[in-house]
């Protein structure tokens, strides 16, 4: 979505704290804004216990684009986070290093090899 024209919006309804990748993408030049969507019945809209969720967390994210991403030294904390960083790295200019990349393998078997077969300039160290 960092490469799409305009503003994209993502609303996370499954896991209350899914936007952990944002600070890492900001290191690459990504532009984001958190928001809380207006929903009539948040207790039924969200799949987590909304009543007990942290009121300081936002469940929506605006992604501004297109933004030229640049390579950076990043660290992943979970497999979805890692897959997101991997795709961003492929779109970025320059070299990106992703620490803890082995986490990605838990959900995306041989992602690096598959992306390489598609023409991605990717190397596991």
Image: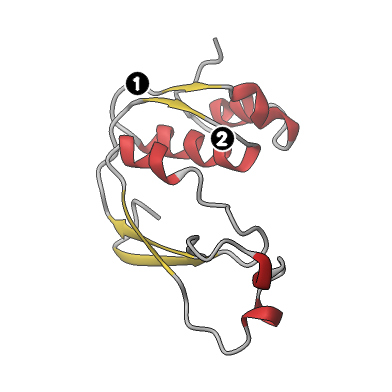
Q: Earlier in the sequence, mark 2 or mark 1?
A: 2
Q: Nearer the viewer, mark 2 or mark 1?
A: 2
Percent position of residue 114, x then y = 62, 30
**Residue located at (54% from left, 33% from top):** 118
User: Horizontally, is 49 left or right of 3 in the view?
Assistant: right
Mark 2 to mark 1 CA distance (whole Å): 16 Å
Q: Quadrant of residue 124?
A: top right
The one nearer the camera, 100 or 110, is: 100
Q: Looking at this view, name the residue that lies furthest to the bottom.
A: 40
**From the viewer's perspective, is residue 69 above or below residue 18?**
above
- Element class at badge 2: helix
Which residue carries the number 2 mark? 82
Classed neighbour count for the residue bearing mark 1: other residues with Cα under 10 Å, few (<14), some (14–19), many (≥20): few
| Res. 56 mark | none
The residue lying at 28 percent from left, 30 percent from top is: 93
The local secondary structure at tag 1 comes to loop
Q: Left or right of 23: which side holds 12?
A: right
Q: Residues within 10 Å of mark 2 (few under 14, many from 20)?
A: many
Horizontal relation, residue 86 to residue 47: left or right: left
Which residue is outermost to the top? 125
Q: What scheme was used to colour the molecule?
A: secondary structure
* Spot occupied by residue 69 in the image (x, y as percentages of width and height): 29, 39
Q: Residue at x 71, y 65 (%)?
A: 48
Residue denoted by label 1: 95
* Quadrant containing the C terminus in the rendered view: top right
Residue 74: give x, y in percent of width and height: 43, 27
Residue 35 percent across, percent down from the top left: 40, 68
The N terminus appears in which quarter of the rendering?
Answer: bottom left
Q: Quadrant of residue 23?
A: top left
**Number of residue marks:** 2
* Residue drawn at x 59%, y 24% as measured from the top left: 101
Do the residues under discs 2 and 1 have CB atoms within 8 angstroms? no
């Amino acid at each position: 979505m960092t490469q799409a024209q305009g503003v994209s919006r993502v609303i996370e309804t499954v896991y209350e704290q899914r936007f952990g990748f944002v600070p890492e993408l900001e290191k690459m030049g990504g532009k984001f804004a958190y928001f809380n969507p207006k929903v009539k019945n948040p207790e039924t809209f969200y799949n987590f216990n909304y009543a007990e969720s942290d009121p300081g967390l936002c469940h929506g994210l605006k992604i501004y684009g297109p933004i030229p991403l640049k390579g950076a030294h990043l660290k992943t904390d979970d497999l979805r986070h890692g897959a997101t960083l991997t795709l961003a790295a492929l779109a970025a200019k320059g070299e990106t290093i992703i620490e803890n990349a082995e986490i990605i393998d838990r959900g995306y078997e041989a992602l690096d090899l598959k992306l390489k077969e598609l023409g991605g300039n990717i190397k596991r160290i």
